[in-house]
Amino acid sequence: MEWLVLLIVVVMLVSAVAVLLLKNFMAALAALSVVSLGMSVLFVILRAPDVAMTEAAIGAGLSSLMLALALRRLGLWKD
Amino acid sequence: MRRLTSALFLTGLAVLMAAIYQQMDLVVTPLAGDAINASAAQQVGAGNIVTAVVLAFRGFDTLLELTILFTAATAAGLVLGKPRADAPRDPDAGFILQAGADLFFPLLLVVGLYIILHGHLTPGGGFQGGVVLAAAFFIPVLARPGTTLDHHAVSLIEGLAGAAFILIGLLAMLGGGAFLTPLLGKGELGTLFSAGTLPLLYLAVGLKVGSELAGLLAQLAATEATD
Amino acid sequence: MLDATLIFYVAAVGLILIGIAGIVLSAHLVRVIFGIVLLEAGANLLLLLATYREGAAAPIFVKGAFPAVMADPVPQALVLTAIVIGVGILALTLSLALRVHRAYGTLDIREIRQRMEQDIADAAGIDMPTSSEAPAPVYAHEDGRS
């Protein structure tokens, strides 16, 4: 069980660093979605299904949608 | 120079966190959680204890959270402003997105309403279902950027839902109880019509959050491109 | 040797530190916003870790099952609230970033700060301050302006 948690945490932390280091903003947005999805799985392992559903719906859904719309308006969606 | 000080600051912060972890007894025994777990079924009648905490035990916090969300969405709408009438619009999306949007709208509507109405039985509730409803109403705008969301109807639904939440809370005071005490009896644990006014409160929360976020997304999508 | 609590704690603190690093060290406004989102995610995880018990069940009454130990519902309710507030904050910061871009045409923080100070100094009728310690010079001009 700990190995699953360790794997997810490693993927999450690497993606979090990639959010700040990737030059292409859409790629950074995708990495942010990976962080949100990893958080959602961690919340399920922590026995909090309500919070996991909220984080999946809002973090990986609405937050990424809003950021993508804003990036489009700012002209940052190309490389 | 700035980067050096920032890196030093972060190193110091990391060292501080490590020191706190060494000293602190991190996993504490919950003070109120066990008592709430034991008594939620008898006192509130909801199957989902987190819903009972959000709406019954800490209902005022939920009201304040709705206020914060309303303030943020209104301020964002104020800052963005209305787009000019002659601003260039995005072209319509392709056939796949349009057909998919037409198919997704009823599906997301049903799923969102299901999640909202069963918030007191299964994981879910007003906020999650509200986000799904917001997506349901925003996807047609995404597929056909020419059609705008009816902002009047959205504001009306949002205002009425918020007012309904506060009204249900005030109704509890008429009976002599505190603000936002659950009314209407507890019902049988696990059925749809249980837990008193909790499903109604969550319905109000879900409609408010859904319409607010749909209006906010539509406003973000309609902002003029600055490139 | 591998303790699940330690791994969760490292994840939460790591996300907080990466978020703060993003806010403090970035030159682009959108990276600052990404840093804010990461910081909120880490803080929510840390809040939920406060009452973690191994082997507890989720705090939901399923028909027929009566688990002995259930997880604590109060931090879960608080984190639920916090996540939704986070999306509200994100909406506001994104609209502010859009306005700044519309007003200044760039999203580089240092350039925006420079031009903002220039605009403020012009609007007040004084010269720009030369250093961050000394106040802006205000002196009487020859024709009586102050």
Image (cartoon, coloured by chain):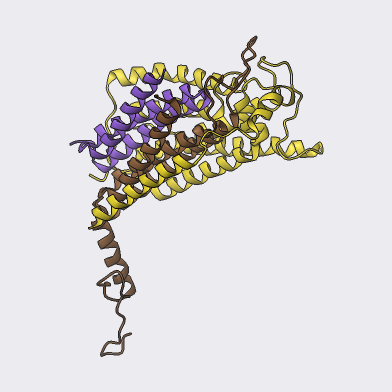
Task: Work out whether residue B203 or residue B60 is closer to the camera in this orientation and state it.
Answer: B60
Quadrant in the picture for the N terminus of chain A? top left
- State the brown chain: C
Task: Work out whether residue C90 or residue C55 is closer to the camera in this orientation and state it.
Answer: C55
Whether residue B193 is situated above or below residue A34 in the rendered picture = above
- Residue A73, image x, y percentages: 29, 41
Task: Work out whether residue B99 or residue C101 is closer to the camera in this orientation and state it.
Answer: C101
Q: Quadrant of residue B116?
A: top right
Chain B rendering hue: yellow
Q: Is residue B19 toward the left or the right of residue B127 in the image?
A: left
- Residue A8, image x, y percentages: 35, 24
Residue B59 in view of the camera: yes
Residue at 35 percent of width and 17 percent of height: B100
Chain A rendering hue: purple
Quadrant in the picture for the C terminus of chain A? top left
Residue C102 in view of the camera: no
